[in-house]
Image (spheres, rainbow, N blue to C red):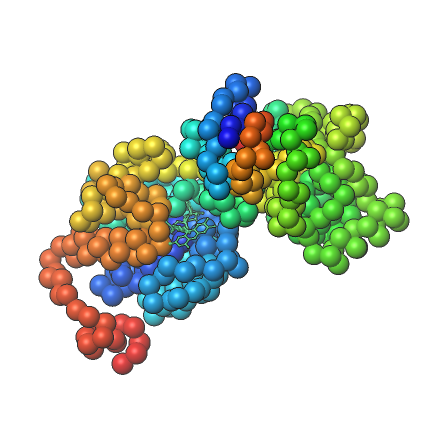
């Protein structure tokens, strides 16, 4: 096991709130590490509406979700934050010296005097089809992502979905699987046209089975899948051999481990004060959609303000013996040096 | 106008629909557990409902965007719609919908 990482601030969530927090902390010389279960920055902006325009970011009359995130990434670049993508913040404990130790689901440990929860509505996780007992097969036979293609060689693979992931993995796994069955609720796909055409060629050549159907039941033992019951729209059911099932229905948001962090969650939101944006636990702050206070609006611009005030309070915890100087980026050569512009 | 919505336990409730609002908004307003993660932007497929036979046919057919998004919904049936794409109007007075599983 590697040594715990020690830093000033650990931010949970790399959505717009978490990203801008890096900037406000950076101006005060505080170093930040960010954790996000997604494999890229942006939270809801890039996951739910990358191409859609936002019209209420002050000073930017129109900007798409992706563009806003790209700009935030550019803005925080001088502060060289460390990103831990593809990891979920799983546990939080207080150390005897008053600092916090955050553990990720992959076992990484980060120690800091300040934790900032910028977790939005929670973690983006794969949608789980409503099939009784599916949990028992997850990780062994049911996978929401393909990590090692080889592990599907010689297997009877069942894929569900109609988007790019479903089609891409149908094309990639068909040559190595023993059999490959693709099911979808209609004979039409939102995936790229050329992948759909390639899939149809494989079906015509007898290399892929395609059915307009859904999975009604999974059969197997000790987490090892053996067969699946499929049902068509006419309610007719039949069984096929299946050693692996890959459902690809995109992501959904689940609150996740934050619920167990002991930070006084109220209706899945963290109550904070509006001077420091600190939770009931000293040193644990909250910003963005995850927090609640009288008058809270779930807007990106509000999260920017919250980040600025949080950073001031975080400074006093991280640097108890230093005095905080209020400065403008326009006129402070000190701040401009940090930003790399002077 | 009235909307009749059946929740995931099979209980039906009557909701007063507001002209111009979406059925998703009315369901949430009535306290039903519709996730609607994207707030009605047709970007999440977590507001799916099944529309009772007879009513499905009366609706404006789904736009391409909705058809695409339904591909990301779970347990889709031929009468599935995304409730954020259904706008309340007098023509829909009495419509019956059932929440799709979570
Ligand atoms: C379709 C749509 C349109 C919108 N339009 C606007 C608009 O025009 N203007 C506006 O101001 N706002 C708009 N919003 C709202 C805006 O997107 C949110 O207010 C904003 O994204 C909140 O930012 P956040 O950083 O607090 O949370 P999020 O963007 O939700 O990011 C939180 C991140 O934290 C991660 N996370 C959570 N828990 C964990 C954990 N335990 N471990 C690891 N990672 C975790 C999540 O995976 C996620 O990436 C819109 C939202 C939607 C869905
Ligand atoms: S609320 Fe997201 S698709 Fe309807």
Question: Residue A258's x, y, as percent?
Answer: 37, 38
Give A130 or B38, whichever is nearer the viewer.
B38
Give above or below for A82 relative to A88. below
Give above or below for A103 relative to A57. above
Q: Residue at x 20, y 47 (%)?
A: A274
Give A29 or B85, whichever is nearer the viewer.
B85
Question: Residue A269's x, y, as percent?
Answer: 33, 38
Task: Specify whether A67 is left or right of A242.
Answer: left
Query: Can the viewer see residue B31?
Result: yes
Q: Residue at x 34, y 32 (%)?
A: A267
Question: Residue A339's x, y, as percent?
Answer: 29, 73
Question: Residue A281's x, y, as percent?
Answer: 22, 39
Task: Specify whether B100 is left or right of A271.
Answer: right
Which image quadrant is residue A97 in?
top left
Task: Specify whether A104 is left or right of A292.
Answer: right
Q: Residue at x 18, y 53 (%)?
A: A313
């Amino acid at each position: 096991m590697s040594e715990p990482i020690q830093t000033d601030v650990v931010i949970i969530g790399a959505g717009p709130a978490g990203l801008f927090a890096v900037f406000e902390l950076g101006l005060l010389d505080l170093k930040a590490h960010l954790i996000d279960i997604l494999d890229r920055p942006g939270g809801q902006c890039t996951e739910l509406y990358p191409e859609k325009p936002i019209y209420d970011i002050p000073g930017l009359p129109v900007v798409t979700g992706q563009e806003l995130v790209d700009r935030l990434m550019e803005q925080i670049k001088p502060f060289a934050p460390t990103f831990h993508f593809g990891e979920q913040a799983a546990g939080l404990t207080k150390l005897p010296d008053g600092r916090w130790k955050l553990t990720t689901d992959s076992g990484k440990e980060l120690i800091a005097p300040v934790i900032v929860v910028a977790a939005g509505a929670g973690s983006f996780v794969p949608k789980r089809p409503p099939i009784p007992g599916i949990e028992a097969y997850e990780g062994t036979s049911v996978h929401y992502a393909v990590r090692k293609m080889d592990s599907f060689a010689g297997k009877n693979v069942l894929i569900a979905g109609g988007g790019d992931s479903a089609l891409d993995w149908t094309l990639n796994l068909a040559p190595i699987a023993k059999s490959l069955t693709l099911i979808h609720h209609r004979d039409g796909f939102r995936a790229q046209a050329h992948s759909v055409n390639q899939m149809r060629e494989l079906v015509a050549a007898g290399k892929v089975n395609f059915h307009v159907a859904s999975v009604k039941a999974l059969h197997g033992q000790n987490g090892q899948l053996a067969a699946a019951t499929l049902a068509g729209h006419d309610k007719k059911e039949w069984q096929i051999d299946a050693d692996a099932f890959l459902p690809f229905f995109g992501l959904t948001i689940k609150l996740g481990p934050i619920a167990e962090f002991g930070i006084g969650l109220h209706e899945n939101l963290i109550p904070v004060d509006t001077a420091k944006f600190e939770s009931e636990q000293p040193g644990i702050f909250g910003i963005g959609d995850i927090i609640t206070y009288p008058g809270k609006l779930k807007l990106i611009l509000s999260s920017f303000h919250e980040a600025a005030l949080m950073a001031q309070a975080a400074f006093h915890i991280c640097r108890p013996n230093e005095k905080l100087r209020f400065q403008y980026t326009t006129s402070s050569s000190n701040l401009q040096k940090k930003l790399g512009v002077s | 106008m009235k909307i009749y919505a059946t929740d995931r336990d099979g209980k039906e409730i009557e909701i007063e629909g507001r002209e111009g609002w979406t059925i998703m908004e009315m369901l949430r307003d009535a306290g039903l557990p519709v996730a609607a993660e994207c707030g009605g932007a047709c970007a999440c497929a977590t507001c799916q409902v099944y529309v009772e036979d007879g009513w499905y046919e009366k609706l404006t057919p789904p736009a391409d965007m909705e058809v695409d998004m339904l591909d990301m919904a779970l347990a889709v049936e031929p009468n599935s719609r995304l409730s954020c794409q259904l706008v309340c109007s007098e023509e829909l007075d009495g419509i019956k919908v059932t929440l799709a599983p979570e």
